[in-house]
Amino acid sequence: MLPQYLKACFLYMGVFPKKYKIPCLKVSNLWISEGILEPGENNSVEAMADRCLSRLALRSVILYDKLTFTSKRIPKTSRLHFTFRNLCVNEAHREKFFCVIKKYADFSFPEKLNSQNRLCFHNNIVLGFEEVHSWMESIPNARSLLCFGPKQPYPIALYLGFRLLKVLDAVSIRFYEFPLQVVKLVHLKYLAITYDGEIPSSISCLWNLEVLIVSRHNNIKRSNLPVYLPIEIWKLHKLKHLECMGLDLPDPSSADDYSLVLENLLTLSGVTAHSVKVGLLARIPNLKKIGIKIESAHDSVETFSFLGVDQFATLYEEIESFKCVVVYPSLIRSPENVTSVPIHFPLLLKKISLSGCGFSWSYVRAMGDLPNLETLKLRWYAFCGPVWKTSDWDFPSLKYLLLEDLDLKWWDSTRDHFPSLVRLVIRHCYNLQEIPRDFAHIKSLRMVEVDDCRKQVTVEIEKQRKRYRNIKSELRVRFSADAEKAK
């Protein structure tokens, strides 16, 4: 029996399709935008959402797909346990909590659906029927419109005449032109769409907006020049989560308006290095997470200047998560372009994810000194060079380390350099000779996963595990060639 505050959260999980991997951040933002959760006496509404996810997981109502190793213990994705799914959907249907449309036949008894406030489509094709449009027009009080159907490459005429709408999740529908009806929905708190063009200045009409997600259909930028959001984006003072792939925040200083501050923004992702400037970030005082994506030669000119002294790290000492992806590492033409200036990270970072950055291994010390770093993911030439030598008391709090697609050959390290490591994952590091044999004696280590590396990589650590029975870590080694043979 769930307590009352968890019941609505549980019922809401039923809006997602069967076997759908539910992003935890997404469902948290939806709960908040729907008004299902309220802040506690000593907790923010975001902390309450994390708490509810944890409580549902403890009761095995939801299952975490991949555990995280940050102090919050909230992973990226989850799913509703299959034994609870029918109960969830049936109870939600009985209470008219939401209406799920999977096929055209679901409109056989529209009079039973007219009182629904939350509309959820698991098949976007039905949105193209005129009868469906007519039915949607007859629902004046709809508060939520969620489209989780398979992504469609062709345009679908989506009815957006719900004047009281608070949540619009249409990221699975491609818009060839920006739907201007959206800016009339002044009650919107959550907006997620797929659109490759420029965002109109009228977006400022959505003064209640808390979550804005603009995904791109084409992953290749059409121009090497930066594409900016309208300056009016700074007027959305309630905005907490901004994810705009390939778009940058404009510099508001030219507007000479000191009220242009995003004081509630916690997450900023999808932007390039052009959005990581001191004068600009000073207007986002409470930022906790930032994700940078560099994908053009123009972006790479000043790619990592924001990691210099008196830059990003100094301004945001309390930021918790930093991610930087260089889509085409060849843009970094020579190591000198990257390593000529020492890099610095915010002091209290808990999570770092880097890909394609091309740093020298000598610069990893900038992360090793961070006292609270718990998760470190290095992918696709994030660091380059054959030798990584760590130092005493590096990474004192690191619990999760991922090394993937790196050209690393020799890893010189000991158990004292990673005293808190719980899980080590190594994938596609074909040059790596071996995992430091001393790692078998890290007391906290519980899992070592090796995928598609040299078979010798795990020889020494395996010998240590067999020799010392008190070693509790589990070793998993997989080779894609063996998997193909098994088929």
Image (spheres, grey):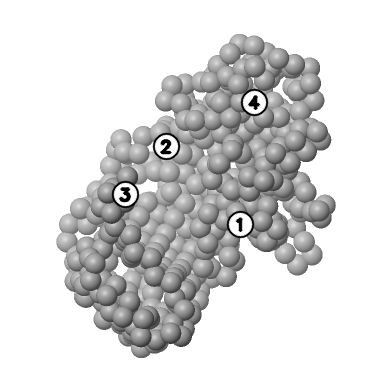
Label 4 neighbour load within 10 Å: few <14, some 14-19, many 20+: many
Residue pointed to by mark 3:
486
Q: Tell me if mark 3 has few (under 14), some (14-19) or many (20+) residues whose alpha carbon lies within 10 angstroms of its own.
A: few
Query: Nearer the N terminus, badge 4 or badge 1?
Result: 4
Q: Is residue 144 visible?
A: yes
Element assignment for label 3: helix
Secondary structure, mark 4, is strand
Residue 133 shown left or right of residue 383 in the figure: right
Report the Cα–Cα distance between label 4 and label 3: 40 Å
On the image, the x and y values in percent for residue 470 come to: 46, 85
Q: Position of residue 218 (x, y in %)?
A: 36, 34
Q: Can you identify the residue that label 4 sits on?
A: 101
Q: Is residue 340 visible?
A: no
Front one among 158 and 83: 83
Which quadrant of the view contains residue 93?
Answer: top right
> What is the three-letter code of the residue carrying label 2?
Arg
State the image coordinates of residue 51 (x, y, percent, origin top left): 69, 61
Identify the image quadrant of the C terminus: top left
Name the residue tied to disc 1: 263
Q: Earlier in the sequence, mark 3 or mark 1?
A: 1
Q: Is residue 396 above or below residue 404?
A: below
